[in-house]
Amino acid sequence: MGWMSDETGLDKCAANYVPLTPLSHLKRAAHVFAGHPAVHYGTHRVTYAEYHERCSRLAGALAARGVTPGDVVATLLPNIPAQAEAHFGVPACGAVLNTINTRLDVDTVSYIFDHGAAKVVLVDSQFLPLAEAACLEMGRDAPTLIEVPDAAAGHPASGRYETYEDMLASADPAFEWVMPTDEWESLALNYTSGTTGRPKGVVYHHRGAYLMTMGTVVSWRMVLHPVYLTIVPLFHCNGWNHTWMMPLIGGTIICCRDVTAPAIFDAIADDGVTHLGGAPIVLNMLVNAPEEERRDFDHEVEVFTAGAPPAPATLSKIEKLGFNVTQVYGLTETYGHVTECLWRGADWDGLAEPERAAVKARQGVAFPMMEDITVLDEDMLQIPMDGTAQGEIMIRGNSVMKGYYKNAQATEEAFAGGYFHSGDIAVQHDDGYMQIADRAKDIIISGGENISSVEVEGVLMGHEDVMLAAVVAKPDEKWGEVPCAFVELKPGAATDAAGLIAFARETLAGFKTPKHVVFDELPKTSTGKIQKFELRKRARDMS
């Protein structure tokens, strides 16, 4: 299909075919936007020519330390310049980038180091104890640690490891980048939040990331030289691929290590931030910031928000502050956002404020780089688009992962029927716009982070006084959702809520720890299955 009758000599060659990769964006920007600001963070301010040179040095330094194509290089970094540079420097030596959530516990980080076989880890001084403990737990084959100090933020070098800047200083600024020969080559390895126990390794390819950058420019209506504030952690879906995207349009990345209202307002007022992304908690933070933490600015800021839909009241308030919010949706497995609540112009412009906010909270339609995203029933058939019938969001397109690393069974299950199964339950309106109705598998989304109820329940069940435990999402004004534990104690047990929460905190990362504990007999079916829908209702009624 599609071939002409005679295509003699019409073959791929170096002149007419180059594998798609986001690395090309920075190589081009080093020339086209050589003197334009690329990355700002405090006193660290580099142009695109300098950015490219620093990434080249990083690639050369890693290669000199034995990193070869196909090896994994991990990071435990906040949103600082080294994390942005790793997105280009690591793949530029042919390696695969594994950005790790800095909020994870020691056991999970150790598992990721081992499962991904990280050869080198770039680690911020603040998280050095976490990395060291994770390496110690591995016992053998631990990765080499390169320390990234941030003295201005109160995290000076420990003196125990080679530092990032010393490593760059000794490297070749003219290192020849290792570009992919096949756009299906692996670019990044991102671990899920372990919603079914151990986290799964999601593998991205160069083609998917390249097309993600192109589609985002279209959907966000971007023009040359935007100024982007890194609120979305670069360890989360590689910051929705925005770091790979910015050189495409000569944008400036403003690194934000600590996400606070003053930091965001200052960046908008002083650096002219035009775009940012973040979970609804960020919107709440801005809306509820006291007057002394706010700054005036004279331009509209475009915002992508994802996670639990922001409350209509929050959307109404933040638009009055000068922000235009677009709801997007995606998963780690889809490189980040792949649907958007694309505004329908005149059809919606006249809506009253409550209806306008309600419409804006929809997950919407597919981004332009995706092939098909819709809601199907259990038989893989399209559900009625009546805003009532429910099904699962199914995704097909080039910005879907290669699969789960070292987990063929999970990959096969995720791709059954020719679509990626999101696990998210949704309705579809008559205009095709999707809207999530519930989260499958009892995932709790707190501040943009996924929490496995199974994992939390397992920890609680380890307490000697606990007979049964079930964890569900409780609505929370600040975080969107927080874990709420319903617990049946053994006869004669005397533990209290504070004690149980402290017990869980010994094992779990802080954001996974239950924020509320209710002691009661758990509702069960005739076969003994806990009725979580009933517990979710109780949790909502508690709010």
Image: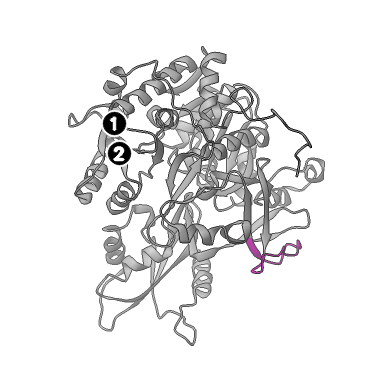
Which residue position is annotated with label 1?
66
- Identify which residue is drawn at 73% across, 52% down: 355
Q: Residue 425 location in percent, x, y?
A: 61, 62
Q: Write the residue at 62% across / 24% down.
A: 298
Residue 481 magenta-highlighted: no
- Tell me residue 285's x, y (percent): 50, 42
| Relative depth, front residue between 179 and 327 | 179
Closer to the camera in the image, 282 or 21: 21
Q: How many marks?
A: 2
Looking at the image, do the residues carrying marks 2 and 1 touch, with CB atoms under 8 Å apart?
yes
Q: Is residue 311 left or right of residue 175?
A: right
Q: Is residue 15 above or below residue 94?
A: above
Callout 2: few (<14), some (14-19), or many (20+) C-alpha neighbours within 10 Å? many
- According to the picture, the residue beneath numbered tag 2 turns out to be 119
Q: Is residue 323 visible?
A: no
Q: Identify which residue is drawn at 49% across, 84% down.
A: 525
Q: Is residue 430 visible?
A: yes
Q: Amino acid at mark 1?
A: Gly
Q: Give coordinates of residue 322: x percent, y percent.
A: 63, 33
Quadrant of the rendered image containing residue 81: top left
Q: Amino acid at mark 2?
A: Lys
Please state the horizontal and vertical placement of residue 99, each as a whole percent of the image: 40, 40
In the rendered structure, which segment of residues is drawn in magenta? 377-392
- Element type at mark 2: strand
Q: Quadrant of the N terminus?
A: top right
- In front: label 2 or label 1: 1
Q: Residue at x 53, y 47 (%)?
A: 401
**Element class at badge 1:** loop
Q: Using the numbered discs, state the Cα–Cα distance from disc 2 to disc 1 in whole angstroms.
A: 9 Å
Q: Nearer the viewer, residue 488 or 386?
A: 386
Decide: few, some or many residues near mark 1? Use Cα within 10 Å; few <14, some 14-19, many ≥20: few
